[in-house]
Image: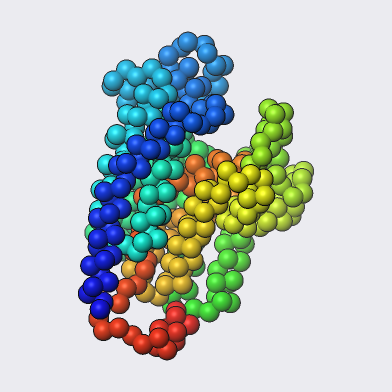
């Protein structure tokens, strides 16, 4: 019976890979013909700066992005649709290769793969910042995939990539660099427990929040201006959103921070829950339902990986540490749910390790249900 189920899961994997191409094509059709203008704002600015047509005002914060895309523009493309199609042609096969390394998939994982393919081709594989971001996560994926026995060296390698990104691209990724190491040691502690109970999960989350608090508290003595900017960044960005006409998906702080670290952490905890379970989007517009479903998929795989923490291999343990560090760092800065979806989508190279490899299949004789319940409780 199990061999039959294994064969079905292998066929599911093959089906997912086969459907990724038509899904990518459909996503590009949606991108080119159906998305409203607001989704192209960043891409238009980058192209305008690259071509010098003065269609949009140049922003200094985009110059590094412009320089990157200019340096690889070997086809001399000049509009956003051309870049979108070209990057889709390059990156979709890369994602297919990554997925092809998976041996088995449940049907829900096929659906998640196709949803991720669509999201990536609509929001990431374009002339924008996210296209650069996913390259960093591909680098992290390569480090995780190295045949190095010492897991901590892999963790340090991933942390160094986050640090390099903080220097060259997004300064706040220094938080992810530090959190990756902290989270790894927390999970190492968790794996040593005889049983992983609910209280251990609660302690893990508390330690992560405390880690963020300690980082911000200490940063004021090292780089006070950066510390103050980080505390007030969300209030500043949401104010800019309001001045620009508002956005239904903006993530407003429950309480205005006003440079108060205590209020910042209060808002931080609430916003973390809001971003991980964005149910409020469903009350704003039914059109946000796909984003909500996609986020629930990610939440499911995150908690399944943590539930199976004692059984997952060290490769997935590193991927879990990197992703959790990314989440806790992102909570500080994401201005709206749209940006959160785009940025989170770039983690697919590591996220798929959790989604596809954290499920512990039974490869031997089937275990009866009572034994399964006992094992699930003990895990």
**What is the quadrant of the N terminus in the image?**
bottom left
Q: Indicate whether 145 appears above or below 259.
A: below
Q: In the picture, residue 4 is in which quadrant?
A: bottom left
Residue at x-position 38% and y-position 38%: 26
User: Vertical placement of 249 versus 191: above or below?
Assistant: above
Point out residue 318 in the picture as x, y percentages from the top left corner: 39, 60
Query: Can you give x and y, in whole percent of width and height, for residue 270 in the image?
Result: 68, 56
- Residue 96 % position (x, y): 28, 47
Relative depth, front residue between 32 and 262:
32
**Is 365 situated above or below 335?**
below
Answer with left or right where residue 110 lies relative to residue 334: left
Is residue 283 something that shows in the picture?
A: yes
Task: Report whether 359 appears left or right of 364.
Answer: right
Q: Depth check: give the residue in front, 105 or 185.
A: 105
Residue 265 left/right relative to 314:
right
Query: To which quarter of the image does residue 375 belong?
Result: bottom left
Where in the figure is residue 114, as x and y percent of width and height? Answer: 38, 49
Residue at the (35%, 56%) spot, across then down: 110
Closer to the camera, 120 or 258? 120
Q: Which residue is drawn at the image coordinates 58% and 66% (left, top)? A: 205
In which quadrant of the rendered view does residue 259 lie?
top right
Q: Quadrant of the C terminus?
A: bottom left
């Amino acid at each position: 019976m199990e061999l039959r189920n294994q064969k079905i899961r292998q066929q599911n994997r093959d089906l997912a890979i086969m459907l990724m191409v038509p899904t990518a094509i459909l996503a590009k059709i949606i991108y080119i013909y159906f998305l409203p203008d607001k989704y192209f704002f960043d891409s238009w600015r980058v192209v305008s700066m690259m071509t010098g047509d003065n269609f949009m005002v140049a922003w200094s914060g985009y110059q590094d992005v412009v320089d990157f895309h200019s340096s690889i523009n070997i086809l001399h493309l000049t509009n956003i649709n051309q870049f979108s199609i070209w990057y889709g042609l390059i990156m979709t096969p890369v994602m297919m290769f990554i997925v092809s390394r998976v041996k088995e998939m449940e049907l829900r994982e096929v659906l998640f793969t196709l949803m991720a393919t669509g999201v990536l081709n609509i929001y990431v594989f374009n002339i924008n910042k996210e296209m650069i971001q996913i390259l960093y996560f591909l680098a992290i994926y390569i480090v995780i995939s190295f045949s190095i026995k010492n897991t901590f060296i892999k963790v340090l390698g991933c942390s160094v990539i986050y640090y390099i990104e903080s220097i060259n691209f997004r300064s706040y990724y220094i938080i992810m660099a530090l959190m990756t190491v902290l989270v790894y040691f927390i999970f190492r502690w968790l794996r040593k427990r005889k049983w992983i109970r609910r209280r251990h999960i609660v302690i893990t989350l508390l330690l992560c929040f405390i880690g963020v608090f300690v980082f911000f508290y200490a940063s004021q003595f090292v780089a006070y201006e950066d510390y103050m900017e980080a505390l007030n960044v969300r209030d500043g960005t949401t104010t800019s959103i309001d001045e620009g006409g508002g956005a239904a998906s903006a993530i407003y702080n429950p309480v205005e921070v006003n440079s108060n670290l205590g209020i910042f952490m209060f808002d931080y905890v609430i916003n973390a829950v809001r971003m991980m379970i964005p149910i409020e989007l469903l009350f704003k517009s039914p059109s946000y339902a796909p984003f909500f479903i996609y986020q629930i998929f990610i939440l499911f795989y995150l908690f399944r990986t943590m539930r199976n923490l004692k059984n997952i291999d060290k490769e997935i343990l590193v991927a879990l540490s990197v992703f959790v560090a990314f989440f806790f760092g992102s909570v500080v800065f994401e201005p709206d749910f749209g940006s959160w979806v785009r940025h989170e989508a770039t983690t697919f190279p590591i996220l798929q390790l959790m989604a596809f490899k954290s499920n512990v299949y039974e490869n031997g004789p089937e275990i009866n249900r009572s034994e399964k319940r006992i094992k699930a409780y003990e895990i």
